[in-house]
Image: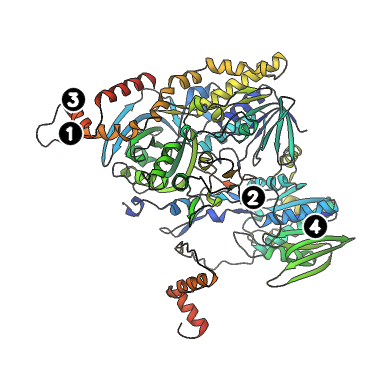
């Protein structure tokens, strides 16, 4: 009874995808989740790219708990009471918003319907290795045997660390998010953000919402809620706290953001119905474990570092789903080859390297450079906002744009040449 | 030994918020949980089973979503669970609830086998009456002990039971069948185990009984069978709390500080004045 | 009609009241060693404010923890014991 073809640890998007595909292919799959129901431990900003999900579930558009299709992307640079905002109106429906609690629950239901056995409230404490291969998992005193274990444990890799396949992460490769869910009538959301009934908005904010600490703010519109949050790089955040640059609790930064005169009108009468926090991967490839596969083991999703931060957009769910899809394909391939040996599972990494996820991770690794350079968060936003103020707030003759930039650079003590070199390097790599 | 444990599926009251503008409780999206005080009762039953053999049956009168809660106790190691659910049972007070539960216990005895013990938690977090256990005992005409902190089998039909009271302890010998109510925190509930959970899921160990099974008079169950009348509910305003940390030099200093705090609190001052019968 | 109360920053305690936990009796996170812990960072970055000072010592209140792991990456296994709550207990997110 306690023997499965596959045990998947963690019913987040990656785990449920792997369980779904493998159960559908006829394997005996056990999907384990530590939370009460899938999704109860999950928190995100709010936006997923649909096509990679449709590759797994063609019925996505009809069945998934899609709240709104993102039709507007905004990026703001904020400093003090001033803000510069860039808005892009999309021409087609590419990404949607949904609470991850709902989306992950749907994915787990799909896995269960495909025949996977889903057990929640189970904390896996150990991936068991015997004679150089993974043979199952342990929880409490209980052992469950599996031919292959798929580790989808998320950003807190307790199991991989126990196996010696990962170390406690470097704080500079992680970000901590504080998020609020604000409840608002759908009609008001549409009216205030200029959206149609099923349209949504995704909004990133840089600048002093994080006091210039690497990170940013976000706003996503759901059906009848708005998700707003603050993300701080853990390493730089900790540095700022110890140095006294950061004096307030992260929730205070978030509340200042929510009540900021530039933003508060959108949700002025709405109540905060939930407040949460979560740590996320910022490192991408740098966060990847020492190995993505071993004898009888595959690592997928956040645990594998499958999160792309392109600066202007962050992709974690579609990349997690894709890594799990690729892992499932590799498992089936290994089965056909005669066993889940390291050699036969090698296909996982090979397939992953060929997928768009890997390309994204490599292409956008330059963003890590931005996040590794507080200059972009503490110096660039005030400089841009100052330049804009010179152009837009002139009582008589306004300066030329170049003059405005030059004098602002001087006033902010920024070397223009250094700035241009840095920007040039970043533009090529995000 | 066959032990029945009563489980109540309750809203997580800790999460229910009060909306001062409308004066109502906000329950939207608040998930229900197994009444936390029932878990020590489950633990007591499991430990007793480990000593005497037999089985533990969890029973809950609740709407269908309570299956989640029964799955949790199955995951702790309960052998099977019975969900007693019927629209006719809705709106029951403690009287109607205990009536249904006592008949469910009779049905267990008739169809599954003799029941030796019914164990309950001390109270529920959503109503705190502690009535149901006592009423079940009287419907069944079984002896009832509450504030139980320890139970040991003596042999035969005898159990030794310790009750925790304010400043003393009582030791009883009780003959089964009996009803016990377990003191809060008397037993530390074990975590859910993977193998129990797996067994529960694979063997589908939750039975559902409706009134078609129990065949109770509709006038005696649910709202109709409930003599309790809620005349009025008053929502208490939230009391603002201040947090202060004081590091005393010694015990005397600590006492002095606390007393000083107390006498400076106007409301408390009134209470203290009443106690000492004069000025402070 | 605007309600100015909603436009003032809420205190952390007020935010925490919005949430649902099923608190385990057993603590899943524990400070093992005080020395070397980044006191200010833990107090300000733990999203739920689980870390506070008692005199010169850090105090960890696990009840409001959301199991995010921030304190974990800011410490070593010798400083902080870090596990997940058992049996599905801990934070129960609903709309996130």
Nearer-the-camera pick, A175 or C96: A175
Q: Earlier in the sequence, mark 1 or mark 3?
A: 1
What whole-number distance in Å separates the C-alpha atoms at marks 2 and 1? 65 Å
Seen in the picture, residue C53 relative to A368 is either above or below; the reply is below
Query: Where in the figure is residue B279, as x and y percent of width and height?
Result: 45, 84
* Mark 3 chain: A
* Mark 1 chain: A
Q: Residue at x 78, y 51 (%)?
A: B56
Q: Which residue is mark 3?
A: A402
Using the rendered image of the protein, determine whether residue B186 is visible from the camera's viewpoint: yes
* Mark 4 chain: B
Residue under disc 1 on the same chain as residue under disc 3: yes
Labelled disc at residue B63: 2
* Mark 2 chain: B
Q: Residue furthest bottom?
A: B278
What whole-number distance in Å separates the C-alpha atoms at marks 4 and 2? 21 Å
Nearer-the-camera pick, A231 or A102: A231
Disc 1 + disc 4, Cβ < 8 Å:
no
Q: Residue furthest left?
A: A396
Q: Earlier in the sequence, mark 4 or mark 2?
A: 2
Q: Which residue is mark 1?
A: A390
Nearer-the-camera pick, C41 or B101: C41
Local SS, label 1: helix
Local SS, label 2: loop
Seen in the picture, residue A391 relative to B88 is either above or below; the reply is above
């Amino acid at each position: 009874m306690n023997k499965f073809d596959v045990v998947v640890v963690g019913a987040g998007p990656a785990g449920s995808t792997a369980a779904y595909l493998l159960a559908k292919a006829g394997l005996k799959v056990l999907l384990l989740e530590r939370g009460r129901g899938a999704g109860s431990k999950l928190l995100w900003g709010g936006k997923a790219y649909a096509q990679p999900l449709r590759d797994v579930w063609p019925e996505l558009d009809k069945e998934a708990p899609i709240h709104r299709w993102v039709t507007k992307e905004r990026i703001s640079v904020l400093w003090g009471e001033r803000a510069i905002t860039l808005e892009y109106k999309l021409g087609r429906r590419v990404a949607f918003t949904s609470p991850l609690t709902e989306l992950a629950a749907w994915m787990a239901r799909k896995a269960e319907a495909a025949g996977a056995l889903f057990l929640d409230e189970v904390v896996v404490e150990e991936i068991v290795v015997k004679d150089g291969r993974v043979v199952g998992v342990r929880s409490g005193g209980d052992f469950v045997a599996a031919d292959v274990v798929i580790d989808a444990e998320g950003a807190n890799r307790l199991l991989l660390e126990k196996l010696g396949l990962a170390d406690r992460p470097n704080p500079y490769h992680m970000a901590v998010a504080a998020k609020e869910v604000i409840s608002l009538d759908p009609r008001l959301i549409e009216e205030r953000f200029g959206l149609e009934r099923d349209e949504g908005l995704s909004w990133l904010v840089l600048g002093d919402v994080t006091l210039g600490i690497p990170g940013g703010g976000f706003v996503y519109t759901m059906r009848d809620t708005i998700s707003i949050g603050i993300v701080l790089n853990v390493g730089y955040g900790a540095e700022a706290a110890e140095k006294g640059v950061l004096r307030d609790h992260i929730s205070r930064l978030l509340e200042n953001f929510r009540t900021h005169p530039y933003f508060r009108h959108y949700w002025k009468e709405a109540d905060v119905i939930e407040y949460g926090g979560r740590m996320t991967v910022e490192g991408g490839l740098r966060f990847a474990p020492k190995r993505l596969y071993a004898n009888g083991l595959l690592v997928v999703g956040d645990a594998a570092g499958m999160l792309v931060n392109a600066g202007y957009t962050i992709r974690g769910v579609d990349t997690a789903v894709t890594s799990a899809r690729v892992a499932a394909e590799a498992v089936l391939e290994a089965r056909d080859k005669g066993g889940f040996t390291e050699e036969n599972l090698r296909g996982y990494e090979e397939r992953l390297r060929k997928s768009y996820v890997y390309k994204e991770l490599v292409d956008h690794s330059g963003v890590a450079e931005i996040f590794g350079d507080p200059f972009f968060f503490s110096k660039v936003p005030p400089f841009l906002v100052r330049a804009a103020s010179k152009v837009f707030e002139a009582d008589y003759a306004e300066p030329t744009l170049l003059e405005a930039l030059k004098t602002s650079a001087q006033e902010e003590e920024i070397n223009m040449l250094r700035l241009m070199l840095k920007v040039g390097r970043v533009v090529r790599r995000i | 030994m066959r032990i029945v444990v009563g489980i109540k599926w309750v809203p997580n009251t800790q999460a229910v918020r009060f909306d001062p503008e409308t004066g109502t409780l906000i329950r939207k999206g608040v998930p229900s949980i197994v009444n936390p005080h029932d878990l020590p009762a489950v633990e007591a039953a499991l430990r007793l089973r480990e000593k005497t053999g037999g089985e533990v049956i969890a029973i809950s009168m609740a709407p269908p979503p309570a299956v989640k809660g029964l799955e949790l106790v199955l995951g702790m190691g309960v052998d099977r669970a019975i969900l007693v659910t019927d629209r006719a049972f809705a709106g029951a007070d403690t009287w109607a609830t205990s009536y249904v539960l006592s008949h469910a216990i009779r049905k267990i005895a008739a169809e599954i086998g003799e029941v030796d013990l019914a164990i309950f938690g001390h109270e529920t977090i959503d109503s705190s009456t502690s009535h149901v256990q006592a009423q079940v005992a009287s419907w069944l005409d079984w002896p009832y002990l509450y504030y139980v902190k320890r139970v040991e089998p003596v042999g035969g039909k005898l159990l030794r039971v310790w009750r925790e009271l304010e400043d003393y302890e009582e030791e009883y010998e009780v003959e089964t069948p009996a009803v016990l109510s377990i003191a809060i925190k008397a037993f530390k509930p074990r975590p859910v185990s993977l193998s129990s959970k797996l067994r529960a899921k694979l063997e589908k160990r939750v039975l559902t009984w409706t009134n078609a099974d129990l065949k109770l008079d509709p006038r005696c169950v649910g709202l109709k069978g409930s003599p309790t009348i809620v005349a009025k509910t008053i929502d208490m305003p939230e009391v603002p709390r201040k947090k202060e940390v004081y590091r005393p030099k010694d015990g005397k200093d600590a006492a002095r500080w606390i007393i000083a705090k107390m006498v400076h609190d106007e409301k408390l001052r009134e209470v203290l004045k009443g106690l000492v019968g004069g000025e402070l | 009609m605007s309600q100015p109360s909603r436009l003032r920053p809420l205190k952390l305690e007020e935010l925490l009241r919005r949430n649902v936990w099923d608190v385990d009796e057993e603590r899943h996170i524990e400070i093992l060693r005080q020395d070397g812990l980044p006191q200010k960072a833990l107090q300000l970055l733990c999203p739920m404010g689980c870390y506070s000072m008692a005199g010169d010592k850090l105090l960890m209140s696990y009840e409001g923890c959301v199991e995010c792991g921030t304190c974990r990456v800011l410490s070593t296994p010798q400083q902080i014991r870090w596990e997940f709550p058992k049996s599905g207990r801990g934070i129960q997110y609903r709309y996130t």
